[in-house]
Amino acid sequence: MAQNFVLTSGIDVFTGTDDADTFSGVGGGLDLLKGGGGNDLFTIDELQMGVLDGGSDTDTVFLTGDENRISTDLTFRNVEILDLQAPKLYATVSQLDAISTLQINAAGLERFDILLEGTMYHPNWYLDLSTRYTSSTQLRVFADDAVNVMGSLRGDLFYGSAFDDGLRGLGGNDRLIGNSGNDKLNGGLGDDYLNGGSGTDTVWFEYATSGVTVDLEAGFSSGEGNDTLVSIENIRGTSRNRSDTLLGSSGANSIYGDTGNDTLDGRGGNDILDGGPGADNMTGGDGDDIFYVSHVDDSVSELTGGGFDIVIARAINFTFTDYVLNPLAEIESLRTSSSTGTVQINLTGNAFSQSITGNAADNTLSDGGPGGADTLRGLLGNDIYRVYNSGDVIVEVAGQGRDRVASAVDYLLATGVSVEILTTNGGSGKSGIDLTGNELVQSITGNAGANILNGKGGSDTLTGLGGADAFVFSTALGSGNVDTITDFSVADDTIRLDNAIFTALSSTGTLASGYFRSNRTGLAEDSNDHVIYEQDTGKLYYDADGTGATAGILFARTTAGLSLTSADFLVI
């Protein structure tokens, strides 16, 4: 049988029946009220500390006080309807979230105010008032702590707190005031007024059903209505593959296009521009800008002298593999989004000077053709460097993979660069390209033109391919510096010996015939056999005294059985 429970100003503990019970009275103490089953009605002047649990079925709390003040120490559970008499409600987010419907019974009100006290903030969750608030009276919401609130389908007024708020107007001509903090504002449909206040604030359109145009400098947006924007620094565009036009201001902006083929322009200031997954056009303008690209057709435009600008290539869903800079964009840094990333991303610069950096995958890094000298960093992985400027700097340390430089110009590996393969950019090329290694071991390969190949230190492998090639020996001899010439042609090629190393060969020019000996022993046979070719092994020795009194020093290996003569050697 249904019961009628009367509340006092003291501590009340009541548990209802399975029928439609009534609870009424002051309700000012530390109460524990449980409705049980049935459609229960709680008619109370004010709610202080304790728990109000409506139980099962459809339960209603009717507040009869002048201000509808619900203490922050009260917990609501299983309440379907909050019915209000006065035009103002003090409550917390968690209390309102426990209520299905918010009803206003006062007649003739122009507006209804909700003052959120001691509220809590969840970045991916909103207190949705659009389904709870059923009155036609204008809703105004004020917060004293960080909050995420979604309004009604009417024109709402939201005042944020001094903290980071999320305010979403939904329908109607709304006014959203962020106040202090870094706020996120979304007016929804209608002609809205969005004012971020102080802090770094964002206007966002993630759920818009059509593309939007946003101009922070002019202070307006269109697409979901004609909105007025004040003190907004950042923009997030639409999802659902809509195409947006998002324009920044003269200050620092962060602009994210989301899905769709978007147009982003940061204008002045140090901006962050990210078009999202689509094929986007991004312009930085003045300032030190950062661009995120994730599509092969993303286009980045930058002014010459427009600051220090960075393009960051990011793989989305493991599908992004290549990015080529706009040839007219002066970008200072082109890199992947993570130095430890394992998705292969190949990067190509342009005629301006850049620092280009890969990741832990096998990257191909290209300086982008003739123009400014670049710095290329492959990091981990078996990387390929495509070089078109002799001034390019390659950064590779030992243990980061088996790396290759493919050069279209004369190129010298700097000391300490751990690159295993140094080649021309095409073996069939006819233009001679000169390649020089460093103190480490490399495989060095020319092309069909006349190449000059110098391994420097380390026991290198030298391959000239076609053309009249020259193989240079110009570093101190020793057992750890014995190069192998794989394809020496007696008819076309030359071995060049530096007389600063081969000191017995003082005169430059073609090696004197008396200084050369070709035999099967690899030993000197008279007083001036300084260069000796061992016919059956292809080994080349240098004998400083020319007599064999001291052992000759092995400095190269080539093909056995060649008809070498002194004419195949040039002293430099």
Image (spheres, rainbow, N blue to C red):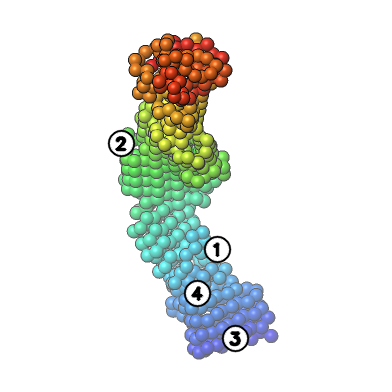
Determine which of the numbered discs, if any, sits on residue 572 in the image. Answer: none
Instruction: Look at label 2 and name its amino acid.
Output: Gly
Residue drawn at (45%, 49%), measured in percent from left and top? 236
Q: Write down the residue under mark 3.
A: 14
Residue 47 percent across, percent down from the top left: 49, 80
Front-most of residues 301 and 379: 379
Between marks 4 and 1, how big is the CA–CA gap?
A: 16 Å
Q: Are marks 1 and 2 in contact (CB under 8 Å)?
A: no
Nearest to viewer (mark 4 / mark 1):
1
Task: Residue 269: tell me if it is visible.
Answer: yes
User: Which quarter of the figure is the N terminus placed in?
Assistant: bottom right
Q: Specify which label sits upstream in the sequence, 4 or 2.
A: 4
Between marks 3 and 4, how big is the CA–CA gap?
A: 23 Å
Q: Is residue 112 above or below residue 237?
A: below
Residue 207 percent across, percent down from the top left: 52, 51
Instruction: Look at label 3 and name its amino acid.
Output: Phe
Front-most of residues 479 and 38: 479
Nearest to viewer (mark 1 / mark 2):
2
Between marks 1 and 2, how big is the CA–CA gap?
A: 53 Å
Between marks 3 and 2, how big is the CA–CA gap?
A: 75 Å
